[in-house]
Amino acid sequence: MSRWVWIALVSAAAMVVATVRLSPPLAPHLAAPTSLTDAPHAATVPPVRVRLGESDVWRIRIDGPYQIMRPGDWRILAQGSRLEESDAIAETDRLRIADRAFDEDSLELRVVRPGSLWVEDTQYRGDLLLVRADGARLLAVNLVALADYLASVVNGEMPASFPDEARRAQAIVARTYAVYHMKTAAAGQHYDLRADEGSQVYRGTQYVDNAGRRLAAETPDSRRIVVETRGVVATYRGRLFCTFYAAVCGGHTMRGETVFPAAAPPLVGGPCEYCGDGPNYRWQVDFNWRDTEPKLLRFLAGSGRRLDSISGLKTIDRGDGIPAEVEITGEPATRRISTTQMRRRVLGSAQLPSDRFSVELDGERLRVQGRGWGHGVGMCQWGARGQAIAGRTCREILEHYYPGCELVRLR
């Protein structure tokens, strides 16, 4: 089945399948298979294309039989019983893997034994796509079964210590997020998702950390969670939507369109009383005003709102779920900017966990007091934990963060 035919079926399925019950678990008697590609119907879904990154050189190893092919072509360009650790690079007019050159702009490395692929220090299920990028850069994309991808993402996005109901909710929003991006990927784009926080955290099967330790990225427990929620996605009025989520909302999730202009109606924002134990639920960062004032003046000048000096700052609360504004008193006028602009263009995103904060100028110190960690739209992951501990079901958690959504199972 082609990728584009499947995408059409996804849209049709979302409109006709029945709602599903998620508590108790969908299939508590099922043991997670060794590879989730063994699960029923997995073959009907095309692989997820996960962007691992771009590099001048990629270290690749395949611990078993493999074939090197032109993408979309049955012809085998090279094959072997094992690929020892080799460098893959893009040369002027060809790609090279170890000492073998290929007159191609892209190559697909297909593995026979699941989980035998290593890229750098990470083990992956599925296959590998290599594409020449700008200059001599080489784009690496893991082609992996959706269920195998999710088994890694569930652990990458939510600790294994969180209750099952929270992790089931995580699996469903991660699946919906992935399928939505598979469905809406731009024509000609070589990947659907990134492997990092730009999409969802995906670390393959296992990886070697900086201390040389092998750490599991997917586990029997994460595979079980994926099996128990197999095929379940969130829809709104029969359509998939992008299920944004963040670590800690700080007590109130954000109204979606204030952060992501195309956010779907269920992302309305609302109170969350369950994430008080989360990291950065409340936080404070102090800045040296002598260093910060010139940065703020430069930003204002660059955006056509020049001030010669600043005499005061005040936070203007615009209501829960809407980013606040910072009112800047100075000469020759008073200006306003959003806390989003203040964080990203003046103070620095790495310094502050979220855009939800207030500011206070105290002599030579700019005090920033905030709440939450991440953009705050959609499901609050620590809030999901708190709700699960309080006895709420997976369905109740999702309906809380995505009001009006319907859970359906893709066929």
Image: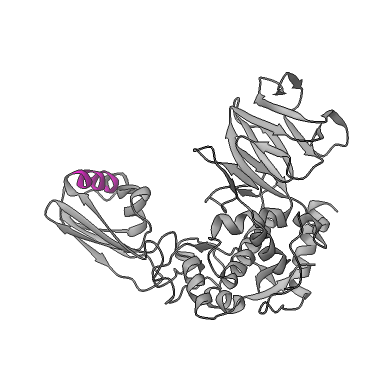
Residue drawn at point x = 65 percent, y = 63 percent: 176
- What main secondary structure does the magenta stretch of the protein show? helix
Q: Can you say whether 173 is above or below 16 in the image? A: above
For this view, does 283 lie left or right of residue 97?
A: left
Provide the residue span drawn in magenta: 291-300
For this view, does 257 lie left or right of residue 281?
A: right
Q: Residue furthest right?
A: 75
For this view, does 315 lie left or right of residue 399?
A: left
- The front one of 188 and 247 is 247
Which quadrant does the N terminus fall into? bottom right
Residue drawn at point x = 88 percent, y = 37 percent: 74
Q: Can you say whether 401 is above or below 368 in the image? A: below
List x then y, in percent, for residue 246: 49, 62
- The front one of 214 and 395 is 214
In the image, residue 261 lies in the stretch drawn in magenta: no
List x then y, in percent, for residue 81: 82, 31
Q: Can you say whether 69 is above or below 340 in the image? A: above
Image quadrant where residue 399 sits = bottom right
Image quadrant where residue 73 sits = top right
